[in-house]
Structure formats: C-alpha cells, structure tokens
Image (cartoon, rainbow, N blue to C red):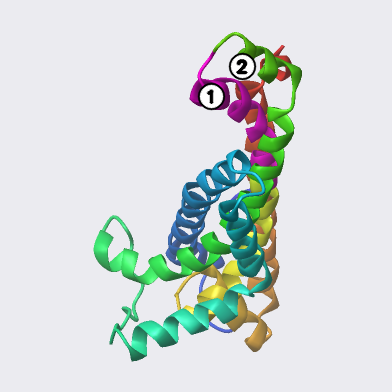
Amino acid sequence: VAKGDLGRSFWREEPIRVLVMRRGPITAQIAVMAVVISWLVGLPVGIIAALWRNSRVDYLVRSVATLFLAVPGFWLGLIIMLLTVLFLRWRPPLVGVYFWDDPWRSFQITGLPALVLGANMGAFLARMSRATLLEVLGEDYVRTARAKGLRERLVVSRHALRNSLIPVITVSGIQMGFLLGGSVAVEQAFSVPGLGTALVQAIDQRDWMVIQNLALLYGLVFFFVNLAVDLSYGWLDPRVRY
C-alpha cells in the first residue's frame, strides 16, 4: 500500500490502482461540486433565517431543510432522473468523461448527483449556520459593536459570521464521511462510472480485494479532510492560532 501497489481485482484481473485512477476523478468531482453547492445554498439560507428569526422566511427555511434532511439521497436521485428523462427528454452520457477533456459532458454526468448530495448537505449546513449565528449574535462583543454605531451588515460580516463558521466547518468535515458513503447509492442511481459504482459492483461480485482497498481509500480521504478542517481553525479564530 505504501508503494501504491493495491493488488489486483479478482474479477477484472486489473490493478486496483488503475481502477482508482480511472474512476476516482469522477467521484472526486462529484464530491467537490456537492460541497460547493452545499455552501453556496446552505450558508446564505442559514444566515437569512438567523437574521429573520421566527419570521415566515425562517419557518419556511427550517421546513424545507428538514424535508431535504429526511429524504434519502438515492430516492431523490431516482425521482430527479425520472423527471429529467420523462419530461425533459434528457439522456446523460453513458461513458465517463473527465472534466479536463470535455467540461460540458463531464458536467452532464456529475451535475445531478452533485445536486442531490449537495441538497442534503446544504440543508444540514443551513440549520447549523442558523443556530451558530444566533448564538454568536447574542454575545457581548456583538452588542458592543452595535453600541458603537456599526451598521448591521458590518456587525454580521466582520464580527459574527467569522466566529460562527467554526462549528459549520467542523460539521462540513464530518459530513464529508456521509458524502462519501452517500455517493455510493447516488452514483448507482445515476449510473455514474465512479468509485461508488465500482464498490457496488465489487460487493455484488464478492471481489473483496477491491472492497477493502476502496474502504481504505475512503477512510484516508475522510482523515485528511478532517485534518484540513482542524488546521483551518487557526485561520478563522486568532485564539486558536495563538
């Protein structure tokens, strides 16, 4: 493993390293796009819900977030697939395409799976960012900033938001583990030729060499993502850096 020799697949009789290098970029692209979607959707929605606390907007945001948290990703993926195929007459490419070869065709393969995973993760981030921002807005230094006459926009962006991001980033790192696990079902639902589909096929074929190497790879990715999250605390919070 240290040399990069992961053995050979019993079923395909090919090096597992080749399998990972061929399918890994597609799964990595889905994961990155899902994280970006979750932050672009979840963080602004959570901030709006916190600033409009106990309003109709807040109730609507919390209801929609709870709905997306309750719906399984693979079921949502199947519904989206049926709607796009039956009503929009859309046919995704059946062969894997890398982003650097053809960005548009690659986006057609990875866009909907990333949207499904990002919706679930974004709903969780919206609830988390709302709760943490509400907690920070009640701190003494925020009241002091308001008493000095700062505009509410500056109070939120400079004083409250940055400190409220630490728990949100922590949850994002933990959610990465669920994202990797969820990609298995979502890739299978959308027939994406990624590592998740390869893992399902290996389980069906009892190819335990592929199974254990992919489980090891997922564990290493989860470890390094959470390590990066821990290191980011020093950038966000000067007290941690000190």
Q: CA distance from mark 1 to mark 2?
A: 7 Å
Q: Main secondary structure of the magenta part?
A: helix
Which image quadrant for residue 155? Answer: top right
User: Left or right: where does residue 11 sit relative to residue 103?
Assistant: right
Residue farthest to the front, as pictured: 55
Q: Please report the residue visible at 68 percent of the width from the left and 71 percent of the height from the top.
A: 70
Pointer 1 and pointer 2: residues touching (CB < 8 Å)? yes
Closer to the camera in the image, 85 or 208 = 85
Residue assigned mark 1: 152
Closer to the camera in the image, 64 or 240 = 64
Q: Residues in magenta?
A: 150-171
Secondary-structure class at tag 2: helix
User: Left or right: where does residue 170 sit relative to residue 149?
Assistant: right
> Which quadrant: the N terminus?
bottom right
Q: Position of residue 13 (x, y in %)?
A: 53, 79
Check residue 144 for magenta coloring.
no
User: Left or right: where does residue 1 sit relative to residue 114?
Assistant: right
Check residue 168 for magenta coloring.
yes
Residue assigned mark 2: 146
